[in-house]
Amino acid sequence: MSRQQRLWPVHVVLAVGAAAMVAPFFWQLLTSLQTFGEATSVPPTFVPGWHWSNYAEVFRSTPFLAQFGNTVLITVVRVLTQLLFCSMAAYAFARMRFPGRDALFLVILSVLMVPGQLYLLPQYRMVMNLGLLNTLTGIVLPGMFSAFGTFMLRQFFLSLPRDIEEAARLDGAGPLRVFWSIVLPLARPGLISLGVLTVLWSWNDLLWPLVVTSDADRMPLSVGLATLQGEHVTDYPVLMAGSLLASLPMIVMFIAAQRRITEGIAFTGSK
Amino acid sequence: MIRRVSALLCAGLLVAGVAGCSSDSTPSGQDGKAAGPVTLTYGIWDANQQPAMQKIVDAFQVAHPDIRVSIQLTPSADYWTKLQTAAASGSAPDVFWMSSTRIGLYADQGQLLPLSDRPGFDSGKFAKALNDIYTLGGKQYGMPKDYDTIGLWYNKKLFDAAGVKYPDASWTWQDVIDASQKLTDPAKGVWGIASPSWTQENLYNTIHQAGGHVISADRKTSGLADPASVEGLRYALDFVTKYKTSPTAQQMTDTDPSQLFASGKVAMFTDGDWDTLTYKNAPGLVADVAPLPAGPKGRATVVNGLGNVIYAKTKHAAAAWEFVKFLGGREANEIQASTGTVIPAYEGLADTWVKSTPQFNLQIFVDELQNAVPYPVSKNTSAWSKDTQALLDKVWAGQQDLDSAAAQMAATMNAALAKE
Amino acid sequence: MATIEATPAAAPAAAGPRPRRSRAGGHPREWVWGYLMVLPLLAGLGVFYLWPIAQSVYFSFTEWGAFGGQRWVGTANYRDFLSDPELPKAAWNTLRYSLLVLLAVPLSVVLAALLNQVRDRHVALYRTLYFLPVVSMPAAVAMVWRWLYNGDYGLINYLLSLVGVDGPHWVSDERFTVYAMAVVGVWASLGYNMIIFSAGLKSIPRHYYEAAAIDGAGRVRQFFAVTLPLLSPSIFFVSVLSVIGGLQMFDTVLMMLGKSNPALAGSKTVAYLFYEDAFLDNRQGMASAVAVVLMAVLLLLTAVQFRLQKKWVHYE
């Protein structure tokens, strides 16, 4: 009891903070159900108008379902390929000995240090010259390889005990066998953490898909949203409906996979 | 059939002494009769027009079962930048929308196929002024698609409530100023007029109504520092700064003026015919449109329009030409008109467009052609229009006075024009 | 699966008649596997990151035509960029933004410390609420805030009007835009920072606090004497990330202000100049020069931060 009582100021501060975090979302939801006139009335009305037509307008003026499909596809491909390439490389860097290993790892780390602006334009030209502008392949391609993912998984592999692998090796299992059937299952928490983070980044990524797509049907949701704003400029109810629809899947995923996401982020912080 | 057309085309091109035929004869020659339907991409930027464009494409595909057309919609904010990079890499759409502001650059840099060399080219159904927009060095590069003028849109309910007579052809600047003052009601959050720093909808018209000009007839010098031009700009600016009957630049950035008008917060707004569908569909809006008021030197509206062009590096020049011919024909223009989408460029169809939306007096947009001045362009319009717009924005935001900005605009514009 | 089966067959060839290497060099067979496993990733990074970085450096010395074609111009882009009248303002905006967003760090340390006090089931709820902005699409977040900031009809100015304050046009008046954007930056990063700090706090052994309590330190003293020093590695990590992210910010400018905004000219960041040059104004050579300068500044700053950390970061 006494502990509870001492805690109430803590709860007050945290709750006020939480309210500030959530208020914009409530406002977004409320506005998305109002007409433009209701949304811009002075003083504001706090009663939702239940105007679902704003959502219909999102579907009318952007190919929302196609864009949703694009985003899902991009995200899935990115996550799977990143997990594969990064885990292979990370394992080699963590466990295997080969000449130049540390130098190569430094090269990978250096990619992490460089701001994205430095490779954006040549990447764009490369995709353009390959004739892959406006294609899902073009959007996905650079994101299949991640220096960050390699770094993160290497740290994770280093934290795993070696003895099971060594026992398997003594039993005559080859390196790939050890990697595939022993190490990967052990590394599941690390893989899931990276996977979830990649889902998050891939879903929300704006700049790269913005520059490589111009056809509304080929865009992911993030770019579709920018398009919606280009068209409806300041028609806030429609913009709120569109932005809510685009964010919703990640919010749902976060609530479902909260532990994995927080673990993943905590892991990146502790290195 | 395509093969025959392209063979013909090659002959035509050879006669005209133009090389580069191989790119379009080889594929059809290789494919022979097994060639599937050719797919063209058609680049457009306006989602509001997409349904009408799709109807036209459907009609075209019925007439040409061997050609498919896929519409590629790029939002207007990014259209030109995306198009330019796509053109630089040889991957622009086969056929795309072109405006008067960019035709000079694209034609000059060899990015467009000259249409007037094509077999069966006929521009007789379009007004000369429209054909002229797309004609450079004696060759026509674009097939006129539509044209647009500007009108004074007004909210009938707000006029009735304030007891102000509706605007008509007799109105002058002073009438608009008086009405805007009577209509402005801060308590209700209503402004008499919205007067943004937009050029086509607002300032280019007022400049000409004051007897000024944006660019000289020979397109070599700027007219923006001309005292009459400055007078035209000042009239539009006064609503914001002097009479305070228009929302400020900041307010119009936070909330778009056409949305303020559509939601009944602004009583008058000068806007093009292209927003007809927006105002028609705005809930609760009872509006109509009148001609722009007369300024000290009479009436004036800028006329602009779009055209359809063919990309120079298209792999399907023959098919693209078939499509552009269709776009310039009566059927396609009738679809544009009857859906109320835009005023078609094709002669004699304006009436169909006017009748498509009887609740508005759309006839004024057609009638205003008598007072129309061409939208000011040069060979490389965007080289100066971006800077002049930035200066106008500064004036409207209250960061610079109009006179010094006008001098600066003229100087920047002259410097850019000297490079052309 | 097939590759796994192939392992024994491939092995003898790879093992070969080579002499045994020292322990550090590893077994030759292991080398081959090592190289094979890093190859796909290295190839991808090489093609899509390393080679482009080299190209960018090259591009920064060239000028591009409207429809392609490059010309060597030496250091002209760098000179133009460094003498660009827009640069001082953009650099100042970038710096101000980065420093303002850094305010999220102390704020989230305090919040994480508070969160550390409450029960687990409450923790999960708070964490979800604070984390919502992190998972939301940044493009969507910018839109929502643009609406909240609306000068005439926005919620923020309405709330301010209740306490008698006449709120400004936050996102269309350049005197306020940087602050408005920084608030969004702080709001969007609190949840992420809190999670890292919470993890750091959990790793602090209880007996440190017990010892401090025995010495008569109250909660506040404990926070400064135990929590802060032991949390300093996490604080350092988050601060570095925050500054790096802040210096590269451009998407909020693009999405929250938009391309036609009278306040845009006074609110651009350096990374926005890059975006404008590269994708709006078709000045790719100049854009590459901006990117190279940006990288130099980032590396310098990171180096300085690592040097400074010795003075205050406490590693066990």
Image (tube, rainbow, N blue to C red):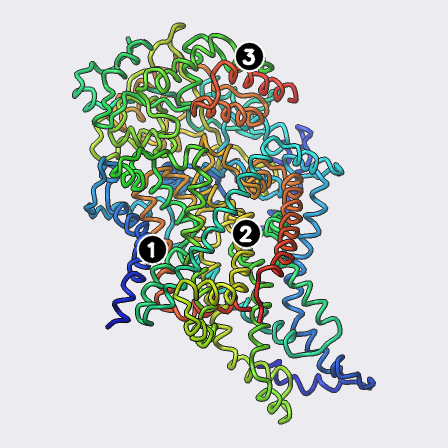
Is circle 2 on the same chain as circle 3?
A: no
Q: Are marks 2 and 1 in contact (CB under 8 Å)?
A: no
Residue A266 seen in render: yes
Which mark, by number, is residue A17?
1
Give the image location of residue A140, x and y in percent.
53, 58
Few, some or many residues within 10 Å of mark 3 (<14, 14–19, 20+) = some
In this rendering, the label closer to the viewer, 3 or 1: 1
Q: Is residue C36 above or below residue C23?
A: above
- In front here: B354 or B45? B45
Q: Residue at x 76, y 38 (%)?
A: C74
Q: What residue type is labelled 2?
A: Val
Residue designated by label 3: B216
Q: In terms of secondary structure, where does tag 1 sit? A: helix
In the rendered image, residues at marks 3 and 1 fall on the same chain = no
Specify the amino acid type for callout 3.
Ser
Question: Label 1: how many residues lie within 10 Å, few (<14), some (14-19) or many (20+)?
Answer: some
**Residue matched to label 2:** C243
Residue B333 falls in image quadrant: top left
In the displayed structure, A101 sits above or below B238; it is: below
Q: Do callouts 2 and 3 mark residues in contact (Cβ within 8 Å)?
A: no
Residue at position x 67%, y 69% in the image: C39
Q: Can residue B5 be seen in this view?
A: no
Q: Which chain carries label 1?
A: A
Q: Mark 3 to mark 1: distance in Å?
A: 60 Å
CA distance for labels 2 and 3: 51 Å
